[in-house]
Image (spheres, helix red, strand yellow):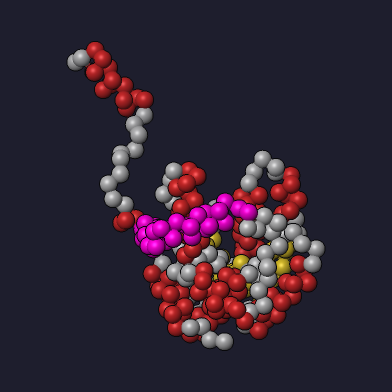
Amino acid sequence: MVLPQKIFSKIIRAVVEFDLIDDGDKILIGVSGGKDSLLLTYALATLRERMKKNFSLTALTIDSKFSDDLSEKISAVKNFCNELEISHDVCEVDIAALIREQKNKSPCYTCAYFRRAVMNRKAQELGANKIAYAHHLDDAVETFFMSLLSSGQLTTFQPKTFLDRTNLTVIRPLIYLREAEIKNFTRGFEVLKSPCPFDGATNRQRTKNLIAELEKSFPDLFSHLAAALRKNSIGELWDAPKTREQMQEKYFALKFGG
């Protein structure tokens, strides 16, 4: 199977625009076995062959212990990586138990936190300098909209992020791809269904559904949200709120004169 030119071009655009891959990079790929991470793995293997940069790839799957038979299904991921000549490791972390222990925290937050910690530690053990995640454009837009709805902030994740505590760089080469494009390409892949017991009942899923519903009335909503991710999209906004100390002088001037 060959990457369609449209998909390949979008990935190359991300790599070039955000300077994601350099000579000598050792990249650890987070591979869950889902459609997004399988495409990411396949795409990076393709780039390794086509790009005139010398970089190496290795992959890690985290068994979060949500399912008793996941270890059997992960063998398909290992075979997939072996066919692409990418070494593959599995790390077991009982995230299900950690979620039960931390009842006051969002299960998604707990899961993401420990997954990142495992990825960072494994990258350091392997001598990797970069970690590749399979977040795509829908993820970025949903994160942006979800942040606005839940915290009143305009923020999302970056295509490239340097982690100064670990001296690692996180890259997201699929950042320009829509989820529908990924689904279409990976129809012939052996895709693992997410074992997460909260799958389909998260804030992210609710945000995804809300965007889809709003698009019925506002067809350009997604493209407008995607455009709003850029720093140059910000129009006229109010100044940041002043502190009590900053307001005090003007307040007393109004109240007492002078």
Camera-nearest residue between 138 and 11 = 138
**Quadrant location, the N terminus:** bottom right
Would residue 168 be found to the left or right of residue 191 on screen? left
Q: Residue furthest front?
A: 217
Quarter containing the C terminus: top left
Decide which of 208, 74 is in the foreground and name it.
Answer: 208
| Residue 80 vertical position relative to residue 104 in the rendered view, above or below | below
Q: Residue furthest right?
A: 68
Is 41 drawn above or below residue 62 in the view shown? below
Q: Position of residue 157 (x, y in %)?
A: 48, 57
* Between 1 and 202, the one nearer to me in the picture: 202
Left or right, 10 with respect to 193, comes to: left
Q: Position of residue 3 (x, y in %)?
A: 51, 83
In front: 225, or 44? 225
Determine if residue 223 is in view: yes
Q: Residue at x 65, y 74 (%)?
A: 191
Identity of the residue drawn at 74% across and 75% down: 75
Residue 36: x and y in percent read 57, 70
In the displayed structure, does residue 244 sit left or right of residue 87?
left
- Magenta segment, principal secondary structure? helix
Quadrant in which residue 28 is drawn: bottom right
Q: Is residue 69 magenta?
A: no
**Residue 208 lies in the magenta stretch:** yes
* Residue at (60% x, 79% y) in the render: 187
Is 94 located above or below residue 237 in the figure? below
Q: Is residue 226 visible?
A: no
Q: Which residues are magenta?
A: 201-230
Residue 62 occupies quadrant: bottom right
Figure label count: 0
216 sits left or right of 104 in the view: left
